[in-house]
Amino acid sequence: MGNKQFFIGIMALLLSYATIVGQEMDFENYNPKSTLVVPVHEVKKAKFPFIDVHSHQRGMSAEALTALIKDMDALNEGIMVNLSGGSGEGLNSMLKNIKATYPNRFAVFANVDFDGVGTEGWGQKAASQLEIDIRNGAKGLKIFKSLGLRYRDADGKRLAIDDPRLAPIWAKCEEMGVPVLIHAADPKSFWDPMDSDNERWLELKTHPRRKRSATDPAPWEQIIQEQHNVFKRHPKTKFINAHMGWYANDLKKLGQLLDAMPNMYVGIAAVIAELGRQPKTAHEFFIKYQDRILFGKDSWQPEEFPTYFRVLETGDEYFPYYKKYHAFWAMYGLDLPDDVLKKVYYKNALHLIPGLDSGLFPKD
């Protein structure tokens, strides 16, 4: 066999192998590149300086803060709100590092230790510690999803979000004039059957611990209602509902909730994929509720922020999201007007969170 014939034979074998592999490829690995040719307006840096009201950082040493500032400046991030402040000495240490380095670029929310709920005097002790943390510099309170999902009281029972023994916490936030950013439950799809109709199937397959049920630990609707009960019982406390309260896929319902609870605001962290697949509906929602929506990202991955900017700022069509297991669909831009962008990026946060440096942002 000549060299030419040998080469042709090898190529035929490789093509045959590639065909077999392609036919056997599973859904997890199927991620085709679009052949659609449309205008592209990538946005590496936000049009206006923004406040990220939903970030998580541990420690925040002077060295870590310096590294964060470099990435923040590249994105046009004016202020980062760290929701993982803890309490007591750990929080104080973080606040001291910030004060000594970049006092106007970072804000920290305190957290409550829910261990011991039901023991004598717990509510007053927790509220007193929260007051100390706020007086020491915390700008708000962050409630993690463990409340409602994992926390238990002194008797071993699931600690409901609307448990009346927690009332002193919400009341203290009203008294101190600080907001509560609260994450309740997870996407409704985590409670639905894991079958061919579940659009979060891939996420549940790759992250099986996220699967929930009506008994693990309670129905989704119940947990969400517990959260809303707290909002209604404490109408003078300002609540920022993380992840748009898991109603970003049903903006009509979310609008009804905002109308019913004027003390509720929403953050867009981790739900940009929901907004990006309904550009017309989401655009109208942002126009109508422009005073109630705050920018947030959640996980600190600087390379992922441009997708948020592109969805909010441009009118681009059919561009990819950065995590297939979160969203296998494409994104579309909302093309929001500048006055709405400014509110979402920084004005609403300046209004809700006390003591932030407004001098970092445009005056208009």
Image (cartoon, rainbow, N blue to C red):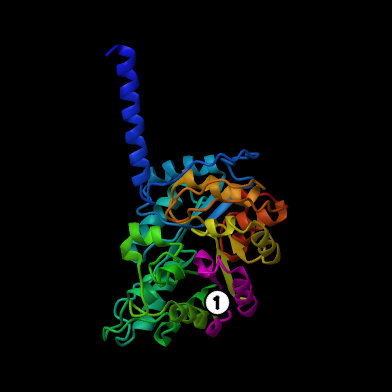
Q: Residue at x 54, y 42 (%)?
A: 34
Secondary structure of residue under mark 1: loop
Question: Is 36 a magenta residue?
Answer: no
The quadrant holding residue 213 is bottom left
Question: Is 256 a magenta residue?
Answer: yes
Place of residue 246 in the rendered image (x, y in percent of width and height, measured from the top left): 50, 68
Q: Is residue 361 left or right of residue 150?
A: right
Task: Compare residues 106 and 136 and report the one nearer the observer.
Answer: 106
Q: Is residue 193 visible?
A: yes
Within 10 Å of the Cα at label 1, are there few (<14), some (14-19), or many (20+) other Cα atoms? many
**In the figure, 4 relative to 36: above or below?**
above
Q: What residue range appears in magenta?
A: 232-261
Residue tagged by mark 1? Answer: 237
Place of residue 242 in the rendered image (x, y in percent of width and height, measured from the top left): 50, 66
Task: Compare residues 53 and 311 and report the one nearer the observer.
Answer: 311
Task: Compare residues 165 and 197 and report the one nearer the observer.
Answer: 197
Q: Residue at x 49, y 51 (%)?
A: 103
Q: Residue at x 68, y 53 (%)?
A: 336
**In the figure, 210 relative to 49: above or below?**
below
The quadrant holding residue 352 is bottom right
Task: Compare residues 72 and 334 and report the one nearer the observer.
Answer: 334
Q: Is residue 323 left or right of residue 340?
A: left
